[in-house]
Amino acid sequence: AQSVTQLGSHVSVSEGALVLLRCNYSSSVPPYLFWYVQYPNQGLQLLLKYTSAATLVKGINGFEAEFKKSETSFHLTKPSAHMSDAAEYFCAVSDRYSTLTFGKGTMLLVSP
Amino acid sequence: NAGVTQTPKFRVLKTGQSMTLLCAQDMNHEYMYWYRQDPGMGLRLIHYSVGEGTTAKGEVPDGYNVSRLKKQNFLLGLESAAPSQTSVYFCASRFKAGQGPYEQYFGPGTRLTVT
């Protein structure tokens, strides 16, 4: 069975500060990992994905994530937060054939 | 391309009423999914389909039924709505393994309130 743990239901940063959202996963097979973003009253939009190619993955809006097998982690980072980054972020895991398992989400709050 | 669309966007039901949510995709995706989203719970899979005419249960299937009569459509039914089914429902779709990217594409959601 697969599972995802996102540490921190809420993360607050100042505009211009580093963003770090944590995700740890559990999977019995080589995983595929995803970060999705959800803006208020909208659906989920893919930020980036890891599918067994490069371990450092770059996504949209300046976000990136690093797959660390030894730590079973896939943390999301952005060097400098912008007000428009305020949203809820979901980490998810799957294998090649199965369904996605989501974490409970982390709400990112950005203050001026 | 419209991507993944959901009908309706909002709905209020009384306990015991029934309704059907429609999901449509125009990306020729083989796999389709229904999730519910509740505060602090993330997204939980209700049912999914890996092809026309096939369906399977997800994590929280009780109280829901689904049908996939056409490849592009995936219907979610509530036969007798309960207040515990108040939620935001999302449909998603993706390519079959080996036929395209593995990420799921999401619809805009349906906000359902059961009183």
Image (cartoon, coloured by chain):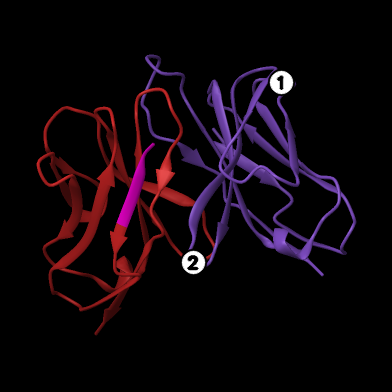
| Snapshot quadrant of residue A6 | bottom left
**Chain B display color:** purple
Please identify the dominant SS of the magenta region: strand
**x, y (%) of residue B4?**
57, 38
Up/down of A90 relative to B34, above or below = below
- Identify the image quadrant of the N terminus of chain A: top left
Q: Chain of mark 2?
A: A
How far is disc 2 from disc 1 in space, using C-alphas?
A: 31 Å
Residue B70: which disc?
Answer: 1
- Identify the image quadrant of the C terminus of chain A: bottom left
**x, y (%) of residue B16?**
90, 57
Q: Residue at x 71, y 58 (%)?
A: B85
* Mark 2 neighbour density, 10 Å: few (under 14) some (14–19) many (20 or more): few
Q: Is residue A4 magenta?
A: yes
**Which residue corresponds to mark 2?**
A40
Amino acid at dot 2: Pro
**x, y (%) of residue B109?**
61, 52
